[in-house]
Image: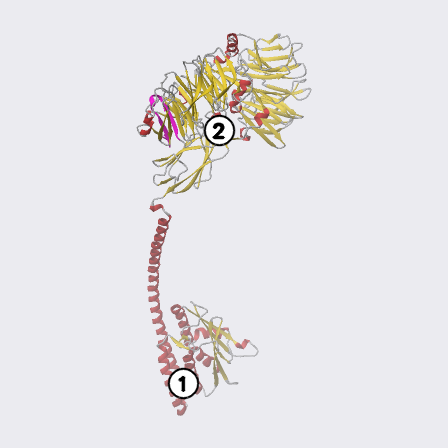
Amino acid sequence: MKNLSVSLINIYFFLLSSIFYAQIPGLVNYSEEEGLNSSYTYTLSQDMNGFIWVGSDNGLFRFDGKEFKQYNKKNGLKNIEVLSSHQLSNGEIFIVSFLNDFAYLKDGIIVNSDVNKELKKIHFEHNPSVYIHQDAIYMYATGDPKNIYMYRNGKVHTIPISISNSRSPDMYTFSFDLSNHLLYFSDKNIKKNIEAYDIITKKKTSCNISLEKYTMVYRKDDYYIFKNKGKIDIYKLYNKFTFKKIQTYFTNEKIQHVLVDNNYGIWLCLEDGGVLHFKQTLLDNRKLSDPIKFLDKYVINSILVDRDNNIWFSTQNNGIYFITERFLKSYMHLPIKNNSSYITAIAKNDSGVFLGYNEAKSGIYNANIIKDITFEENRKIEHKAIFSEGNTVIFGLSRSIIQYNTTTHQKYILNSGDYNPKNVLPYTRGSALICSSAGLAAYNYSTHRYSPILQQERIYTALLYDSDSLFAGSFKDLYKLDVKTKKKTLFLEGYYFTDIKKLKHNVYVGATNLNGIILFSNNKVLKTIAQSNGLLTSQIKKIEVENENVFWASTNSGVSRIEIRGTDLKINNFTQTDGLPSNVVAGCVIKGDTLFAGTSKGLGILSIRDLLSQQKFINKRVIINSVTIGNREFFNVKQKLTGQTPNNNIIFNLSFPDYASQGKISYKYKIEGLNNHWETSSSPKIILNAIPPGVYTFKVFGIGYNGKQSYASSDVSFEIEPKFWQTWWFKFLMIILGASVLCILITLYFQKKRNKKLETLYYEKKIAELELQAIKAQINPHFIYNCLNSIQFLLYKKDYAETENYLDVFSQMIRKTLHYSEKTFMPIQEEIEYLSLYLNMEKLRLKEQFDYSIHVSETVDKSWTIPSLLIQPFVENAIKHGISKLSDRKGEIDIRFDYMDTSLCISIEDNGNGINNKDQTSIKSGSFGVKLSQKRIETFKQLFETNITLVINNLSEEKEKQGTQIKLYITPYENQNTSLHH
């Protein structure tokens, strides 16, 4: 067995070469540089939110995948030597420290025994064993326990134990079964059966097996592992008191302690450093095979398998180590020796996969073994390319080209370093193309004949596309080259091609150094695929063709699988989180369903089917640890979160425990109610300044490495309450008040303006009234003058009777004229009486030379008022210029009052000889009475906002009529649908 142990150590000796990654590809170390400020770590645990908790000699640490949060003395720990931490179902983290300094973390605050005196009830001489059940924690001493202490919700309860009358200092208590109230113990010195003690009935029951001296017991549910030196016995407990042995395993290693993870995996932590892990678990019915040993430079204190089956190791003095399940399984099931070298070139054939390193050494992978081939000892010249065909492999190193036969293992050095090889590529059968700083050449590996094709030009890649022509890529251009004539034609300018492969007939794919991937035919570019299309980067190293529609691109950021679907593309990106040993990938090859990726940290062997079946989202959500609004921090984000201006700055403290992303985590968030734009931040603290009052919802997604996003957003609502002057009612009141003040100011302004206008109108009206009075003063003398002329005419004829009669009527006319001349308006009825009196007086003067008639329409109300003495001058004008000159017929004057289209129409019509345009003008301007009437019309318009229109019609232009018609239209301005003045 000792020889077997030595053999195992020799097999895995390569694991000792590096502290950080060389042990297992994908192994990550977190120590002081990453924020774990501790030299000694104890127990690891994971809480319900997914946080990893680390007990250490420098306090308690919480890790969220990006940063460590430390809890120490300044946070309330009385003893910073934290052995372990345990989360209860109520969210509390119970902290077990040395020297009985127990504490718990609640809502981000540590509560110690000075704050909660209940914790002082718990006392042990040595470190206790701990059992967790929902919201309670049970603690008891492993040696001669006197009490079981139960802590729940801030209270401590003591359960007394009386196992035996005589206390034995060597009594060993190793398990507590809460469901059956049983405490299992044994005596270390006296070989006797294990006993089960019922803490309720105080009854002891003997079990079926005993413990050997110095045996330690480790429990996982009903499974018990007994460790004694280099032997472990695995038992399963049946019916509370019967132990059944499952199997035994021996090792010459000194086992410090045994750990069983959540998946029932068995880990043996060794005293001299390292850990042994079995492929089988406690649930397997197979015999334990030889374990795999790793981390053998470090003493392992604790192992945790988290919910994603990632594995965590706490060590003495070296921080904690982390590895994903994918990496561990790959290593456990495919433990390839010497698979940690920096690979710079890769190729394949039926014999296996060929690896070129960053030194004068190569490797051949076959049947889970890498066979090394050393060309020159300790020479740091790297591989540029590898070509393989049949049993021939050509290794292109930076200073030489070596041909190797996989059957005979013979080497042939083609070039001693006259120029630098850049690439070795397929050509015709039995030959290869060699690209170098000196040009392009064909090499026949059967005859060792070297034939230059293109000289004096640096060529990096080439590809044959017909029997006589090929593509040749320089540092900046791609040419078409005729092999026979040596003539080259520029095909693509400005592209530095690093690799070219043929997809299908007349379709080629090229990898460029800066411009991504170019799909082209013999005569044009078909498509360009770059980082903007979804690639990890636009700097591409190598292309590997899977089929005519699918190819792989290797980059310094991982590998991309590109599938052409008609005019669309499907791109899948894979990085270290998907199982690559490193993101720096020199190239990859495909054999069946397996992808072999040559990386800077060894060969990655991945199932393509498994890669494509991986989830596109991360099955986690962002954890909102706390929200700080103003000066108040809320740890319970489910409660109502409120703040008030001016303390309206908000800080969201976030975590996204996606440990596979190895700290490459960012957050995509938006504030609904404030804006709808998504923002991205790599900081776990999102700070928002001066948020205006309102109700908002903070939405955030976690983004892991390679851009994978959490499956759902984490949401939290909060409210910024306004000060009273920011409330809607206050604003509404201010608006009303402001509107009122504005209305008052506007009213005062227009009132002032109106008063000024009214004052102006008042003076204008006064002037107009004085003018109207002056006009009236002119009308009265004019009328009296005309009457006196008539009286003079009658006296001249000595017609004294008529003169007396006329004077009687004249006196009535004078009285009425004096009466109405003082008034501005008069009723239509009085206007008719006045006109009748005047016409009768004129008939007397003219000896019945005319007749008259006055008609009032039914639509006219005789009480309506019209401007006084307005019509008489037009009637007088009709007598004087119309009928007074008639000799062949008797004169007729017809006066009508009618209401038409909201206007009062007054017409004065005579049957005289009519007028022409010249006479019409004389009527309007020559008659003194009419002229005064027109002045009155204009004055009325100005004073009383009444529109008076004068229309003169010559009836003689009609065949059936003679005479003149005067029409006056009176229309009020203010209301056209009502009557005139009353």
Nearest to N terminus: mark 1 or mark 2: 2
Amino acid type at mark 2: Gly
Amino acid type at mark 1: Ser
Q: Which circle marks residue 580 in the picture?
A: none
Q: Percent from the top left, x then y, of residue 958?
A: 56, 76
Query: How many numbered badges does the structure rendering display?
Result: 2
Q: Secondary structure at mark 2?
A: loop
Q: Is 501 or 420 nearer to us in this picture?
A: 501
Is the C terminus in the top left, top right, bottom left or bottom right quadrant?
Answer: bottom left
Relative placement, left or right, of 348 versus 707 is: right
Q: Which circle marks residue 704 in the picture?
A: 2
Residue 199 falls within the magenta-colored stretch: no
Q: Is residue 22 visible?
A: no
**Residue at figure coordinates x 35%, y 50% from the top left:** 734
Pointer 1: what residue?
A: 790
Task: Tell me: residue 953, above or below residue 561.
Answer: below
State the extent of the magenta-drawn residues as a range.
Answer: 92-109
Question: Looking at the image, is mark 1 or mark 2 nearer the viewer?
Answer: 2
Quadrant of residue 108 within the rendered picture: top left
Q: Percent from the top left, x then y, of residue 702?
A: 47, 31
Quadrant of residue 616 within the rendered picture: top right
Residue 105 falls within the magenta-colored stretch: yes
